[in-house]
Image: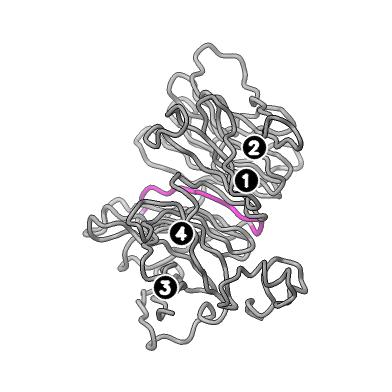
């Protein structure tokens, strides 16, 4: 196994340290994290649920079926790829019950899995208020209660939306942002119903927003998340059930790093960056309830970036937590609570491919879930992670 290259995660404004191998204190990941890589196709991955079911998209460039964009499900217990519909579609998220959200023919859609039916899924077009000007809507995320978030589009302006119990709700904007000149999307929702998203003001500045329920008035209130110290654009991407938010910022001016994003997290309205301002940029894409974040370390050359995962205060290149010598792991898009990671890279055949990083902390070539099922490893707290692979 390679000695993991890691970067210390630091609070905002502290000095960064790039730590190499033996110069660093032995981090928890060296004894608790190890992966093997499985190629699962050539598509754009989007999300993975706790059971390991994945959703993603083929685009016209793949010439899959009739060449139209196609959302699909890749079940964990099957090698069969399930297309959601024969119409043009995209799939963005899947909950633990296998319910999928996305869009069919540019209309926000929820697909419910069917058992023992000729059709794998039944589509429900999410309701919209009547408007002749409406051109597009998409559902971007959902929770296990089937509360769905996304956006609709009227006259070219996008608006953040919540669908709950088949009801459509336009989410409010933070104070001081006029609806006429502000666009945006709701990107994610957790089990408590907290929602995160990104707005764009009239000057093109992006603004990260948290929407929380106001129980007194049975409505949502919009909270503008604090910016980074350079007051640049910031975007919120995802939120876990601990209400930790991930996103990125782009400083207005930062010398050599003008083209690089800075990955960041928010906890209790306090912002931290994943790495310091003196290291390559990071773009986070997913977070699980163990506070593990995945994404991409941006390259300082025209080459592809590096997929990363954070664990116990350290940021690792994902490939360094494997024994792989022929895979290039470029971007990690999501991680579930059993630590499975999906992403894009270049396979040993030198082809752009989708990968599944499978946790194997026992280093025996079997997944942690297989070791739990066989009794080889214990999981007393029933969280799909072997007890010996957790930090006590």
Q: Secondary structure at mark 2?
A: strand
Q: Compare marks 1 and 3 and give the one earlier in the sequence.
A: 1
Instruction: Give the Cα separation between the discs numbered 3 and 4.
Output: 22 Å
Measured as percent of width and height from the top left, residue 196 is found at 56, 46
Q: Residue at x 58, y 75 (%)?
A: 361
Disc 2 from disc 3: Cα separation: 36 Å
* First along the sequence among labels 4 and 1: 1
Residue 211 image offset from top left, x and y in percent: 61, 43
For the C terminus, give its image quadrant: bottom right
Picture quadrant of residue 64: top left
Q: Which residue is mark 3?
A: 320
Circles 2 and 1: CB atoms closer than 8 Å: yes
Q: Are marks 2 and 3 in contact (CB under 8 Å)?
A: no
Mark carried by residue 238: none
Label 2 belongs to which residue?
148
Alpha carbon separation for disc pair 2 and 1 = 7 Å
Which residues lie in the magenta part?
A: 231-242
Mark closest to the chain's N terminus, 2 or 1: 2
Question: Helix, strand or loop at disc 1?
Answer: strand
Q: Which quarter of the image is occupied by the N terminus?
A: bottom left
The stretch drawn in magenta includes residue 234: yes
């Amino acid at each position: 196994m390679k000695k993991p290259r890691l970067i210390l995660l630091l609070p905002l404004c502290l000095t960064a340290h790039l730590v190499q191998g033996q110069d660093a204190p032995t981090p928890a990941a060296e004894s608790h994290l190890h992966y093997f890589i499985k190629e699962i196709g050539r598509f754009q991955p989007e999300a993975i649920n706790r059971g390991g079911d994945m959703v993603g998209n083929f685009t016209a460039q793949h010439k899959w079926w009739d060449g139209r964009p196609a959302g699909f499900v890749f079940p964990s217990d099957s090698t069969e790829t399930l297309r959601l519909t024969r119409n043009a579609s995209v799939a963005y998220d899947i909950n633990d019950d296998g319910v999928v959200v996305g869009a069919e023919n540019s209309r926000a859609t929820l697909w419910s899995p069917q058992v023992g039916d000729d059709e794998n899924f039944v589509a429900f077009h999410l309701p919209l208020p009547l408007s002749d000007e409406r051109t597009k809507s998409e559902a971007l995320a959902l929770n296990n209660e089937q509360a769905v978030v996304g956006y609709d589009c009227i006259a070219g302006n996008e608006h953040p939306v919540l669908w709950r119990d088949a009801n459509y709700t336009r989410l409010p904007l933070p104070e001081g942002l006029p609806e006429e000149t502000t666009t945006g999307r709701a990107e994610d929702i957790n089990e408590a119903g907290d929602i995160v998203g990104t707005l764009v003001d009239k000057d093109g500045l992006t603004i990260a927003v948290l929407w929380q329920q106001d129980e007194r008035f049975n409505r949502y209130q919009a909270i503008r998340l604090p910016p980074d110290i350079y007051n640049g654009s910031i975007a919120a991407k995802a939120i876990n059930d601990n209400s930790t938010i991930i996103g990125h910022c782009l400083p207005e001016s930062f010398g050599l790093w003008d083209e690089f994003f800075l990955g960041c997290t928010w906890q209790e309205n306090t912002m931290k960056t994943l790495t310091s301002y003196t290291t390559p940029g990071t773009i986070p894409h997913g977070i699980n309830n163990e506070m593990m974040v995945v994404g991409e370390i941006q390259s300082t050359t025209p080459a592809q970036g590096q997929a990363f995962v954070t664990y116990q205060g350290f940021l690792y290149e994902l490939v360094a937590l494997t024994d792989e010598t022929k895979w290039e792991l470029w971007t990690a898009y999501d991680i579930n609570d059993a630590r499975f990671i999906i992403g894009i890279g270049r396979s040993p055949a030198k082809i752009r491919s989708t990968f599944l990083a499978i946790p194997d902390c026992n280093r025996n070539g079997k997944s942690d879930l297989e070791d739990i099922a066989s009794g080889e490893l214990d999981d007393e707290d029933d969280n799909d992670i072997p007890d010996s692979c957790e930090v006590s």
